[in-house]
């Protein structure tokens, strides 16, 4: 299992990485997947906007883009890259009146849930995704790590 965290043009968070990695791994395991190689890249709006244009031809801001790099669509070994705009997460936390820790936990879980084959394009898919996120946020180690941000 390999989970890595990278920071592009933003300061590195002082998270306790082992509990965070275990939490991400536990999400995958509960969904009957296992992490093989997963990279989280935390970045700015500008960086993620450029990825959105270059790879998805979307000209919008977003909080997350997930790339599934698994060798087979039916593979239960997760390999992927998850890009998260910290600018969007901060703004969404304010908009939805959540703590930053809660919102970043939601987005971290959201990315791994995409790699566990959950979608959010339709209303029913989005409802299931939100239920899953809410379920996993409750156990996020980041909610207990507030002094480390």
Image: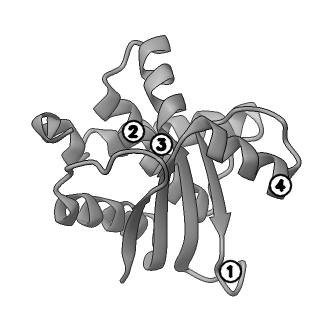
Q: Distance between the residues labelled 4 and 1?
A: 27 Å
Dots 4, 3 in contact, CB < 8 A? no
Please give the residue where the numbered disc 3 appears in the rendered image.
107
Q: Which mark is residue 91?
A: none
Q: Distance between the residues labelled 3 and 1?
A: 24 Å
Please give the residue where the numbered disc 4 appears in the rendered image.
54
Which of 102/77 is in front? Answer: 102
Dots 3, 1 in contact, CB < 8 A? no
Viewer-nearest of discs 2 and 4? 4
Quick one: label 2 or label 4, which is nearer the N terminus?
4
Neighbours of disc 1 within 10 Å: few (<14), some (14-19), many (20+): few
Please give the residue where the numbered disc 2 appears in the rendered image.
104
Viewer-nearest of discs 3 and 1? 3
Q: Distance between the residues labelled 2 and 4?
A: 24 Å
Single out the residue that lies furthest toward the right: 57
Residue at image point 42% right, 21% down: 93
Dots 2, 4 in contact, CB < 8 A? no
Secondary structure beneath label 3? helix
Q: Distance between the residues labelled 1 and 2?
A: 28 Å
Question: In the picture provided, is 16 more to the left or to the right than 3?
Answer: left
Question: In the picture provided, is 122 more to the left or to the right than 148?
Answer: right
């Amino acid at each position: 299992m390999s989970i890595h965290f990278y920071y592009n043009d933003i300061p590195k968070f002082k998270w306790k990485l082992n509990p965070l990695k275990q939490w991400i791994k536990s999400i995958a395991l509960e969904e009957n997947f296992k992490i093989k190689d997963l990279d989280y890249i935390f970045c700015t709006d500008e960086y993620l906007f450029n990825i959105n244009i270059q790879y998805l031809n979307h000209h919008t801001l977003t909080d997350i883009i997930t790339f599934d790099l698994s060798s087979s669509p039916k593979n239960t070994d997760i390999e992927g890259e998850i890009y998260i705009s910290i600018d969007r997460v901060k703004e969404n936390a304010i908009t939805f009146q959540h703590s930053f820790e809660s919102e970043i936990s939601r987005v971290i879980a959201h990315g791994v849930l995409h790699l566990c084959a959950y979608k959010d394009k339709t209303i029913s898919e989005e409802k299931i995704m939100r239920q899953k996120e809410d379920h996993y946020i409750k156990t996020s180690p980041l909610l207990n790590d507030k002094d480390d941000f």
